[in-house]
Image: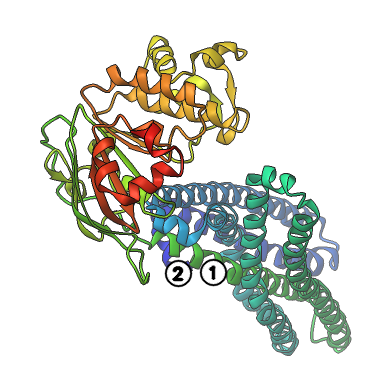
């Protein structure tokens, strides 16, 4: 998965990557040439007292050093730009994929995990790309080139490389093998911390209302301790690498000096060659160390790449049609034809055999007990879920055959849990229509019974709104969500229990103000209050996912026992009649 992810998203940057390879090659070769020049200065210049040779070779050495520096800086610059661009592209790909998910896929992954995959996981793979551009390219060149140059200086000490390099590789390899499962577990534990923290922040009012702060503190402490425990174990293993590398480097240096001195004493080697051989051996071991750094990062990046690819490979259960129908008549006629919905693996359907028609200019209300499938029924219109049986059509066309943008432009949805985005009142209302004027916004607020409290807010339409609308009350949040839908002026209004947080007087005023605005639109209202829907042109009663009654209020009182139970739980039958 890691290779596939890198190949897919690095393809647009192939030219920059090749440039990085060329620059790293030139810079590494220059670094390999420096010890040889230094050896020549010692053996040919200092030993013989040849000052012109020392100056000439020293000037050439400065030039090679300049080339190395320039190439290294340029390689790191291009490598960093490529890595950052790669991270940007992967984050955008994950974001767009998640944006196309239905509620089913979002629930499957969970919001905390999706956030972690698009932030921490992408960052790990991005860091691998950056380190590859700076280390992975130069390490093999340094290692192979160092061996060749060291043998060129003296073959008699080559057995030291045969011993020290494998010892370093095996020792660090054993550490890395034990680190891989720790990194895999760490990503799972990070997901758990994000999930607990998100739950506690979102449900802070519930936590305080039930005085559960100590319990939630302990729950977060446990999740935090589990991450810390895994990180500590991985960190202890990683801390072993530096002492191992240092030990091998120092022992190898001592061995080169010990055996090299004997060869110099025997006249088989010169002092400059010994200095160069030692430098090359250190370069080889440093290249091995850089490779081990990459070996540490690759397993964790591979785990992260698996998690990212899992999101990118997941197709939405609500897929856009290959050849969408674009020529539709206007009006907003909404028809459910034997529609049903069942979650994958569920023993029973949420909805089954639902047949009803909602016409323009009429209000259709949906009532039923908790869990009857009211929200699921409404959610199938904008394709938050797709029907698993039957069909849902708008103006005679199955919603699954419509262009999603065209479908959504016809719908104004006020969800059961109204959500406001961080920004201002105006920016939230213009989600319904980006081109709406201030007068349009005030008109929508007037109809939604929100004009008074918005004018009382400092800044009016430009008053700040916190993420989720947590700085306004539940009733104010619902009225702003209703105003957002009204700004769009759609053909179909879907109110999913959108009046539950309003008092009876405000509810009555809002419904009265809605009538002239929605006179030519299709209105579907999901509600718990009988007072909210008793004047509807058509009331649909759901029970256990099936339609058990359709008609007006007075008709259902005579013919539908389920509706009578709902009414009598709120009002006396006489008052309702």
Where residue 219 is drawn, which disc sits there? none
In the displayed orientation, state which residue is furthest to the front: 574
The image shows residue 214 at horizontal and vertical percentages of 81, 55
x 78%, y 55%: residue: 217
Local crowd size for mark 2, using a 10 Å CA cut-off: few (<14), some (14–19), many (≥20): some
User: Relative to 546, is 15 on the left or the right?
Assistant: right
Residue 433 can be seen, yes or no = no
Q: How far is the residue under mark 1 from the one under mark 2? A: 7 Å
Q: How many marks?
A: 2
In this orientation, which residue lies closer to the viewer: 210 or 148?
210
Task: Locate residue 221, reporting x and y percent.
Answer: 78, 60
First reached walking from the N terminus: tag 1 or tag 2? 2
Q: Residues within 10 Å of mark 1 (few under 14, many from 20)?
A: many
Residue at 67% over, 68% down:
293
Q: Quadrant of residue 528?
A: top left
Please indicate, yes or no, whether residue 378 appears anywhere in the rendered image.
Answer: yes
Q: Position of residue 227 (x, y in %)?
A: 72, 65
275 lies above or below 462? below
What residue appears at the point 36 percent right and 17 percent down from the top-left corner?
513
8 w.r.t. 517: above or below = below
Q: Are marks 1 and 2 in contact (CB under 8 Å)?
A: yes
- Quadrant for the N terminus in the image: bottom left
Give coordinates of residue 469: x percent, y percent: 57, 32
Give the answer, above or below, for where 303 lies relative to 125. Answer: below
Which quarter of the figure has residue 345? bottom left
Is residue 341 or residue 165 the one in the foreground?
341
Residue linked to disc 1: 302
- Asked which secondary structure carries label 1, the reply is helix
Disc 2 target residue: 1
């Amino acid at each position: 998965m890691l290779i596939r992810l890198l190949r897919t998203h690095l393809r647009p940057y192939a030219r920059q990557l090749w440039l990085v390879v060329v620059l790293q090659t030139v810079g590494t070769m220059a670094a390999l040439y420096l010890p040889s020049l230094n050896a020549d200065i010692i053996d040919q210049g200092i030993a013989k007292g040849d000052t012109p040779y020392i100056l000439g070779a020293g000037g050439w050495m400065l030039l090679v050093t300049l080339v190395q520096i320039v190439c290294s800086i340029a390689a790191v610059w291009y490598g960093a730009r490529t890595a950052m661009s790669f991270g940007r592209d992967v984050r955008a790909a994950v974001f767009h994929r998640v944006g196309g998910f239905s509620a089913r896929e979002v629930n499957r992954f969970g919001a905390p995990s999706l956030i972690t995959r698009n932030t921490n996981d992408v960052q790990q793979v991005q860091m691998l790309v950056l380190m590859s551009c700076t280390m992975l390219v130069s390490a093999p060149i340094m290692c192979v080139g160092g061996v060749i140059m060291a043998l060129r200086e003296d073959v008699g000490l080559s057995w030291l490389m045969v011993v020290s390099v494998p010892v370093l590789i095996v020792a660090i390899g054993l550490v890395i093998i034990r680190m891989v499962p720790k990194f895999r577990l760490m990503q799972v534990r990070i997901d758990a911390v994000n999930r607990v923290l998100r739950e506690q922040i979102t449900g802070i009012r519930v936590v305080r209302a039930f005085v559960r702060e100590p319990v939630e503190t302990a729950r977060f402490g446990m999740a935090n301790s589990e991450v810390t425990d895994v990180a500590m174990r991985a960190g202890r293993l990683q801390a072993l690498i530096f002492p191992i590398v240092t030990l091998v480097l120092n022992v190898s240096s001592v061995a080169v000096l010990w055996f090299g001195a004997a060869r110099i004493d025997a006249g088989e080697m010169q002092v400059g060659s010994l200095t160069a051989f030692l430098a090359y051996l250190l370069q080889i071991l440093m290249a091995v160390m850089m490779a081990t750094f990459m070996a540490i990062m690759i397993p964790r990046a591979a785990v992260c790449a698996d998690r990212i690819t899992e999101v990118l490979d997941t197709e939405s259960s609500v897929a856009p049609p290959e050849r969408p129908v674009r020529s539709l008549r206007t009006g907003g006629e909404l028809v459910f034809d034997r529609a049903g919905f069942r979650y994958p693996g569920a023993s029973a359907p949420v909805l089954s055999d639902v047949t009803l028609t909602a016409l323009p200019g009429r209000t259709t209300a949906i009532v039923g007990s908790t869990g009857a499938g009211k929200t699921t029924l409404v959610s199938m219109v904008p394709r938050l879920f797709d029907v698993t049986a039957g069909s849902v059509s708008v103006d005679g066309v199955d919603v699954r055959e419509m262009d999603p943008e065209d479908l959504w432009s016809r719908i104004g949805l006020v969800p059961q849990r109204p959500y406001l985005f961080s920004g201002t009142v105006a920016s939230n209302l213009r989600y319904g229509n980006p081109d709406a004027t201030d007068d349009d916004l005030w008109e929508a607020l007037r109809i939604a019974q929100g004009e008074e409290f918005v004018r009382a807010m400092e800044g009016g339409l430009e008053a700040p709104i916190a993420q989720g609308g947590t700085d306004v009350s539940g009733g104010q949040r619902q009225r702003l969500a209703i105003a957002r839908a009204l700004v769009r002026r759609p053909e179909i209004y879907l109110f999913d229990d959108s009046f539950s947080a309003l008092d009876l007087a405000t509810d009555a005023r809002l419904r009265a103000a809605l009538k002239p605005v929605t006179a030519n639109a299709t209105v579907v209202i999901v509600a718990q209050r009988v007072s909210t829907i008793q004047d509807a042109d058509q009331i649909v009663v759901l029970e256990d996912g099936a339609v058990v009654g359709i008609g007006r209020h007075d008709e259902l009182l005579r013919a539908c026992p389920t509706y009578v139970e709902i009414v009598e739980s709120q009002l006396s039958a006489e008052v309702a009649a």
